[in-house]
């Protein structure tokens, strides 16, 4: 065999090896696109369900019911007819706030439940290093809705003590009172 024949055989072997790698990469890309399509459909369904999600909580004494929408905004507050004869304004304010927090916790739990299947689909998709050797991971670049609203997630329920911007009892003319 001549040197040209050996070189041609080596080139053919390299081409064949390259074709094999390309075919494997194409299969991975096809699987990734199929998974992405499935995730997109699941996300659209979940987003529709989340948008229509509400939650209601009732105070332990039954005097107050608070309904919140999917963003946690209070959309309704209902009082038992005997509320104003059975409690003080300060206690009622605490009961309303606590009941609203309970409703928000409930709506977050429902949203996390609705988004869990989408998060599971994401977990099954390959990460960038699975496709390209040496590439950085992109899996945790953006927090997912499921982790953002998960049961262990803490969200401040009251403003900080020095936050008079969100304190309804603070003076209206904040700048004049800061001295």
Image: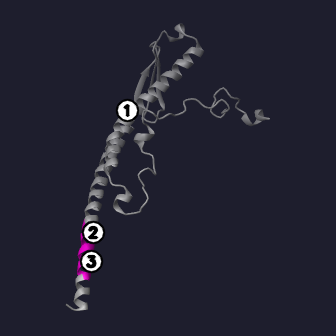
Give how far apart the Cα atoms at labels 1 and 2 are.
44 Å
Residue at x 22%, y 92% (from the top left corner): 2
Judged by its main secondary structure, the magenta piece is helix
User: In front here: 148 or 132?
Assistant: 132
Name the mark nearer the viewer: 1 or 2.
2
Assess disc 3: are there few (<14), some (14-19) or many (≥20) residues with their C-alpha within 10 Å of its C-alpha: few
Residue at disc 3, secondary structure = helix
Q: Is residue 64 left or right of residue 42?
A: right
Assess disc 1: are there few (<14), some (14-19) or many (≥20) residues with their C-alpha within 10 Å of its C-alpha: many
Kindly give the residue lying farthest to the right in the view shown: 179
Write the start and end of the magenta stretch as one range. Answer: 10-23
Mark 3 or mark 2, which has the lower sequence index? Answer: 3
Residue at x 46%, y 29% (from the top left corner): 104
- At which x and y percent is residue 35? 29, 53
Q: Is residue 69 left or right of residue 36?
A: right
Q: Which residue is mark 1?
A: 110
**Relative to 168, does residue 51 appear above or below in the rendering?**
below
Label 2 near label 1: C-beta < 8 Å? no
- At which x and y percent is residue 63? 47, 14
Assess disc 2: are there few (<14), some (14-19) or many (≥20) residues with their C-alpha within 10 Å of its C-alpha: few
Q: Mark on residue 123?
A: none
- At which x and y percent is residue 111? 38, 36
Q: Which residue is mark 2?
A: 21
Q: Which residue is mark 3?
A: 14
**Relative to 63, does residue 112 appear above or below in the rendering?**
below
Is residue 107 in sight in this rendering? yes
Name the mark nearer the viewer: 3 or 2.
3
Give how far apart the Cα atoms at labels 3 and 2 are.
11 Å
């Amino acid at each position: 065999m001549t040197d040209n024949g050996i070189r041609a055989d080596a080139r053919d072997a390299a081409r064949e090896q390259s074709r094999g790698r390309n075919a494997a990469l194409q299969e991975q890309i096809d699987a990734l696109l199929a998974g992405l399509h499935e995730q997109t459909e699941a996300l659209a369904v979940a987003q529709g369900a989340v948008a229509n999600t509400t939650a209601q909580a009732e105070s332990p004494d039954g005097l107050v019911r608070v309904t919140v929408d999917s963003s946690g905004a209070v959309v309704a507050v209902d009082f038992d007819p005997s509320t104003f004869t059975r409690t003080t304004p300060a206690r009622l304010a605490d009961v309303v706030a606590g009941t609203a927090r309970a409703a928000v916790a409930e709506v977050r739990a429902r949203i996390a439940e609705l988004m869990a299947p989408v998060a599971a689909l994401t977990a099954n998709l390959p990460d960038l290093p699975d496709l390209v050797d040496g590439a950085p991971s992109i899996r945790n670049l953006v927090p997912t809705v499921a982790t953002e609203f998960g049961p262990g997630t803490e969200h401040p329920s009251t403003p900080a003590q020095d936050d008079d911007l969100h304190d309804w009892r603070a003076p209206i003319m904040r700048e004049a009172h800061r001295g």
